[in-house]
Amino acid sequence: MAVVSCCHHHHHHPFSKLTPIKKFPTHKSIINISSSPHTSTHHPPPLSLSQKSASDQQRDWLSSLKNSTLSLALAVGLLTGIPTSEYSGPANAAAVPISPILPDISVLISGPPIKDPGALLRYALPIDNKAIRDVQKPLEEISDSLKISGGKGLESVERNVRQASRALKEGRTAIVKGLAKSKVDDGVALLNKLEVGMDELQKIAESRDREAVVPKQKELLNYVGGVEEDMVDGFPYEVPEEYKNLPLLKGRATVDMKVKVKDNPNLEECVFRIVLDGYNAPVTAGNFVDLVQRHFYDGMEIQRADGFVVQTGDPEGPAEGFIDPSTEKTRTIPLEIMVVGEKAPLYGETLEELGLYKAQTKLPFNAFGTMAMARDEFEDNSASSQVFWLLKESELTPSNANILDGRYAVFGYVTENEDFLADLKVGDIVESIQVVAGLDNLVNPSYKIAA
């Protein structure tokens, strides 16, 4: 199983307050939307990366009802972005809409969102096996049980574990039947470990050792995730002809991103483990892994850190992305969105442009540390190398009703040390990003040609 990456810090409290944003030299063309006099200083205005005026875009995009809603949001200072007085960063830096299209109310009031990155990745796998999901669900519900104080919480944990154990016993045959033929041995070995581990967790709960519950729960869910990945037999669909020669991640990969933190007495460096999902974003994830193998990000600064997102990937010089040496042009990739219920991603248009207002994405902006591609706000297919991690929910970006979902391509989640993302600031250094698993899932790697 994956080894937990550590962050080196001096004190027991998790991290210091986020350093205020530093001014960044203006070297790319950006249009900033001026702050309304009624906008709260706690919620800076968003910025656009297009030369087209915000008013033109707003007239083009918004119905009168949605205009009214957005105006109200602006008036109370809900929109989040980069302060125009403090930051004038790289083009592509926003990755946040000027005038977001709000989802229908029916979507806004949908059920409780899944926010755990591990759970999101498990549910995003292209499998359909109710038996393993029946084991997974009560193990995930342990997190809710632990929110109950005292012995009642641990009694609830015991019930969760009994339910999961019963589901495994009753559904084992169906689970094994669902394993890919080439992965049966590995899947069965994981099921055996899962069975033993649930007995151990039951004893932990009975002994009222609350501190030991979460590590064991995570271990068991890793086994579940491994079994579910063993159910995927090959890559489930064909990438469109126009993109099939790009670097593609046909499966998943894990990377470790090591960041050197400056001017923080409590944190020296941190290693963030990130799982990249090529099942749902093969072009986007493949592009990133290819750049990682080129060491494109090594030594690059964190270029935005405003409490809403952390962003990097803008190279020095006039280019706004990766210049492919073979063409001497910026390599761009299409917007790539996998929708729940679809067998393959949608390309080149936002869900809003496609009229899919109620569609749910397989990789939503639900988790702290959701990773996505930055792009020009008004050019769907302009992403190249700039990436960002979402740090928090705001009033207009709640989980499961997110104005970013369907507009920006998510391709992974930070699964370890994600909380420390909030401690990063502009000028901190990405010392290295290394692929630690799944490199064999990368096809058409251009870095090998370059080498």
Image (cartoon, helix red, strand yellow):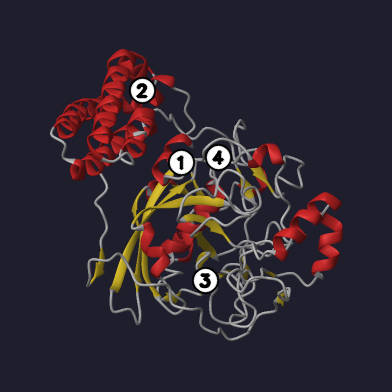
Which label sits in the foreground, 4 or 3? 3
Residue 130, image x and y in percent? 43, 20
Q: Residues within 10 Å of mark 1 (few under 14, many from 20)?
A: many
Q: Secondary structure at mark 3?
A: loop
- Whether pointer 1 and pointer 2 mark residues with C-beta atoms closer than 8 Å, the reply is no
Type of residue at label 1?
Answer: Leu
Q: Which residue lies under the disc numbered 2?
A: 181
Q: Which residue lies under the disc numbered 4?
A: 362
Q: Earlier in the sequence, mark 2 or mark 4?
A: 2
Q: How many marks?
A: 4
Q: Earlier in the sequence, mark 4 or mark 3?
A: 3
Task: Give me the C-alpha separation between circle 1 and circle 4.
Answer: 8 Å
Q: Residues within 10 Å of mark 3 (few under 14, many from 20)?
A: many
Residue 68, image x and y in percent? 80, 55
Up/down of 277 relative to 77, above or below: above
Which label sits in the foreground, 3 or 2? 3
Residue 156, image x and y in percent? 29, 30
Q: Which mark is residue 306?
A: 3
Which residue appears at 79% of the width and 51% of the height? 66
Give the image quarter of residue 140: top left
Type of residue at label 4?
Answer: Lys
Task: Give me the C-alpha separation between circle 2 and circle 4.
Answer: 26 Å
Residue 138, image x and y in percent? 35, 28
